[in-house]
Image (cartoon, rainbow, N blue to C red):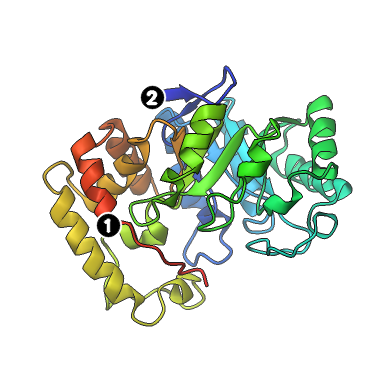
Amino acid sequence: MNKVVLGNSSVKVSRLGFGCWGIGKAMWVGAEDANSKLALHTAIDEGINLFDTALDYGNGHSEKLVGEVEKESGKELFIASKIPSRKYEWPASNDSLLKDSFPVNHIIDMTEQSLRNLKRDHIDLQQFHVWNDNWASQDEWKEAIYRLKKDGKIRFFGISINDHQPENGIKAGGTGLIDCFQVIFNIFDQSPIDRLLPFCRDKNIAILARVPFDEGALTGNIGPDTVFPEGDWRNNYFRGDRKSEVAQRCTKIWETVHSECESLSEAALRFTISFPEITSVIPGMRSIKNVQANIVSVKKGNLSSDMVQQLSAHRWVRNFYK
């Protein structure tokens, strides 16, 4: 697996990372720990070293699995996690106050809880799970980062940018304290191209591209008759006529990409890594089959510049999380 340097650091991370939301089990129906651990071990054996988890993924369950597998593998991984807002808000609203969402003690206490879950003495990349750029000039979050780095509890710090708000973080990036942004970036949501990617290129800030498959839409496997298990959050994400609209748009995308790609999911992953500002793409993976398929796709490398240009026509501005 090809590895690239993370932003201004000397650390190298795999071009394909492992998104660990699904293995936390909460909200995703059907995840089984045994299969999740096999997928994690397969990823490590194939050279993936970047694993992105969060304290809120199954109330620490995802972190615990990642920590267990790291110990079992005998290899040192690059583990990223996230601090939930004390208000448990997704996204952070425009009128949220830093003192209510991320007070200093909360930032430190949540990081220490994640360390206990991971059974580690440090987190490679700690991130705010949501963000409000109105907080950028305030000192409390900066103080917490300084303390965590000084104490060796984190190596790097970043922000997981609110869904479909790629510019809500640029002010924070200007402080020099942000090593990495995590942002939704896929064939549908191409909005990071406008300002975030050029900003990060100029500041040499790393970017992790999340939701490359648009929660499954860009695999080409979702259509009008798709049924999700009861209790699975995707029943809400793809409610109403959304599955039909997704299927129609994916058919048109396939007509565009089939000359270069063997599947729509391959096109989705290769699209994200075709931009040099993207450090890694981090799809969710819960099975060996998905890990192996994603590895094959990413190893094929960038799409042609002509194909990337053609895919710009498939940009789709909407927010299914609402």
Identify the mark nearer the N-term, 2 or 1: 2
Q: Is residue 224 above or below residue 306?
A: below
Nearest to the observer: residue 203 or residue 3: 203
Where residue 112 sits, quadrant-wise, is top right
Amino acid at pointer 2? Asn
What's under tag 1, amino acid-wise?
His
- Residue 258 left/right relative to 148: left
Around disc 2, counting alpha carbons within 10 Å, would you say few (fewer than 14), some (14 to 19), or many (20 or more)? few
23, 202: nearer the viewer: 202
Label 2 vs label 1: CA separation? 28 Å
Specify whether residue 17 is in view: no
Residue 21: percent from left, percent from top = 54, 54
201 is higher (above) or lower (below) than 281:
above
**x then y, percent, for residue 207:** 51, 37
The furthest residue to the left: 259
Quadrant of image for the N terminus: top left
The image quadrant of residue 137 is: top right
Left or right, 257 with reference to 144: left
The residue lying toward the viewer, choosing from 217 and 186, is 186
Residue 2 disc label:
2
Judging by the rendered image, the residue that carries numbered circle 1 is: 314
Give the image location of residue 19, x and y in percent: 50, 46
Binning the other alpha carbons within 10 Å of mark 1 as few (below 14), some (14 to 19) or many (20 upward) gives: some
User: Is the residue under label 1 in contact with that under label 2 (CB below 8 Å)?
Assistant: no
Specify whether residue 311 is in view: yes
Q: Is residue 148 left or right of residue 294?
A: right
Residue 8 is situated, as x and y percent measured from the top left of the image, at 58, 22
Q: Secondary structure at mark 2?
A: loop
